[in-house]
Image (cartoon, helix red, strand yellow):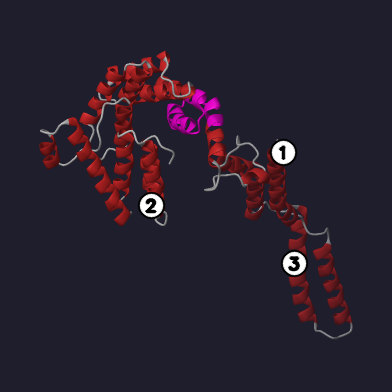
Amino acid sequence: MALWFVFALMTVAAIFAVLWPLGRGGRPQSDGGEAAVYRDQLAEINRDLAAGQIGSSEAEAAHVEIGRRLLAAADRQRDPPATSSVKLRRSAAVMALVGLPIISLALYLPLGSPRLGDFPLAQRSRVPAATESLDSLVAQVEAHLEKNPSDGRGWNVLAPVLARLGRYDDAVRAYRNSITYNGDSAGRRADLGEALAGAAGGIVTAEAKAEFERAIALNADETKASYFLGLAAEQDGQTAEAASIWRAILAKAPSNTPWRPLVQAALARVGGSTAPAPSDDAVAAAKDMNEADRGAMIHGMVDRLASRLKQNGDDVEGWLRLVRAYMVMGDRDKAMTALTDARQAVANDAERLRQLNEGLKNLGLDG
């Protein structure tokens, strides 16, 4: 209301500024002012004639001219004509009284924001800034979704952020709303199952398993759902089934898939994998070896990899292969030692350190 009151005052002031000079311009001259001047001039001519300062013919001509002017002034006082300037002033007054408010409203309503609430100066410092915290941004999105619960795109954006923040219960609700308003899909079902498992502390509950099975029904190649179904089998003590599921995932996955080390580590955990794949020649040579010789060959390959990395520590992939090999071999102490050596080797290269930490996370180690 205060805003509209200010606008009304501004409009009245603008109208007054227009009407004031128009009103002053239409005032008639003071009564008899011009006629009195002409009468004085006639009296003066008569005095000059009596004094002999002008001739009778000159006095007569002056009387005629001043008499004509006196009659014209008398006519103007009796009946002031409605000139075009008066009409123009009246038109301008009407426009000021009626047109100015109408034009102002016609421009403001489509271009302004009459329904926008007040925005105090204290809050303006919080408007989009690159340094604004993630929690603050999430709170803004949540507030928006409370008012617009059918905004499927908003739920789709919010859900994975909540999961990364560890707010799994809220993430479950967001994923359910995303499915409701965006439609069902294998990816959304798998994400919902992952959030349910996260809310249960990493346990694949019956509810989470049902979501993963729905995802597989929609898309048999949904990798996340397959991985968690393998995890569910492992948690149920069905290690052979878990290994079978994870082997099938690895058989389809490209060698450079970022999540491949995570599945390999899971497979190694249930005893379903060997050390990193040797070369084709090594595989051919190992066919005729007994188990002891084959194990010695694998250990020799791992030792050579470790020696090479001591000479050239910039090979991030090599370090990850070494750590994974030690984990597969069940030697966790050596895996942790290799992890420490790897971080020291790439400590001065921020990008390599980031890649290393990311790879270690995929292996299930603290990155």
Amino acid type of disc 1? Ala
Kindly state the secondary structure of the residue where label 2 is placed: helix
Image point (38%, 36%), residue name: 332
Q: Tell me which label, 1 or 2, sits earlier in the chain.
A: 1
Amino acid type of disc 2? Glu
Q: Residues within 10 Å of mark 2 (few under 14, many from 20)?
A: few
**Coordinates of residue 217 in the picture (x, y in percent):** 28, 17
Residue at mark 3 to residue at mark 2: CA–CA distance: 101 Å
Image point (20%, 33%), residue name: 292
Q: Residues within 10 Å of mark 1 (few under 14, many from 20)?
A: few
Between circles 1 and 2, the one closer to the viewer is: 2
Question: Label 2 belongs to which residue?
Answer: 351
Question: Label 1 belongs to which residue?
Answer: 2
Question: Label 3 belongs to which residue?
Answer: 69
- Give residue 279's quadrant in the image: top left
Kindly state the secondary structure of the residue where label 3 is placed: helix
Please state, as top left, top right, bottom left or bottom right, where the C terminus lies in the image. top left
Magenta stretch bounds = 142-171
Task: Please indicate whether residue 113 sits to the left or right of residue 316 in the image.
Answer: right
Is residue 21 magenta-colored? no
**Coordinates of residue 162 in the picture (x, y in percent):** 49, 31
Between circles 3 and 2, the one closer to the viewer is: 2
Amino acid type of disc 3? Arg
- Residue 255 seen: no
Image point (71%, 50%), residue name: 19
Please state, as top left, top right, bottom left or bottom right, where the N terminus lies in the image. top right
